[in-house]
Image: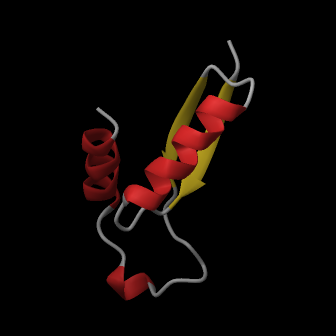
Amino acid sequence: MKIGLYFGSFNPIHVGHLIIANHIAEFSDLDQVWFVVTPHNPFNNMATLLDNNKRLEMVYLATK
């Protein structure tokens, strides 16, 4: 089984993230695409970053 990893802060996850993951899943030889919630995007302000667990929960709910 081929699995692709999609890394991001997902702060918050939005339809654009889902479109990208869906496109990769449909038009590549991957069997699955897994979202990996990263702790901090160095290009974004740390003060506006939601809690890691909250972002993980949002990704889980968005991909159910």
Which residue is depicted at the point 26% across and 47% down?
57
| Residue at the farthest right position | 29
Q: Position of residue 29 (x, y in %)?
A: 75, 23
Which residue is depicted at the point 63% across and 19% down?
31
Answer with the quarter of the image where residue 15 lies: bottom left
Which of the two residues, 62 or 24, is positioned nearer the viewer here? 24
Compared to 27, does 35 lie above or below? below
Would residue 63 be found to the left or right of residue 33 on screen? left
Q: Position of residue 61 (x, y in %)?
A: 24, 41
Answer with the quarter of the image where residue 26 lies: top right
Would residue 45 be found to the left or right of residue 63 on screen? right
Q: Position of residue 42 (x, y in %)?
A: 60, 79
| Residue at the farthest top position | 1
Which residue is depicted at the point 52% across and 46% down?
36
Q: Position of residue 11 (x, y in %)?
A: 38, 68
Would residue 49 be found to the left or right of residue 17 on screen? left
Would residue 19 be found to the left or right of residue 50 on screen? right
